Amino acid sequence: MASPAKNLTPEVLTATALAGCDAVYRIGGPGAIAAFAYGTKSIRKVDFIVGPGNQYVTEAKRQVLATSELILWPARAKW
């Protein structure tokens, strides 16, 4: 899971643990999409990319579509 540090509340971390998430990264935006799609030295490539994002995240998802399976193309999240 990737999320900006400000969003990693105890509730969010509890939910990720209950969902079986094995790694949480304090990154967000298009950079997170690229890191998950292609992998980095510290972040392994993933098979699925899901979740909300703004227009820049949506564009990053579009650009990596051939690399990872996208399960959701939501617009900006209304939290």
Image: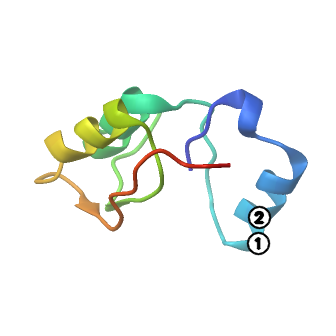
Residue for point 63% across, 31% down = 4
- Residue holding disc 1: 18
Where residue 62 appears, as percent x and y from the top left, is 18, 46
Q: Residue furthest right?
A: 10
**Residue at left offset 43%, top offset 34%:** 32
Q: Quadrant of residue 24?
A: top right
For the residue marked with disc 1, what is the amino acid? Answer: Leu
| Label of residue 15 in the image | 2
Above/below status of 28 relative to 1: above
Q: Secondary structure at mark 2?
A: helix
Type of colouring = rainbow
Q: Position of residue 14 (x, y in %)?
A: 83, 60
Q: Position of residue 70 (x, y in %)?
A: 28, 61
Specify the farthest residue to the left: 66
Give above or below for 24 relative to 60: below
Q: Is residue 42 left or right of residue 67?
A: right
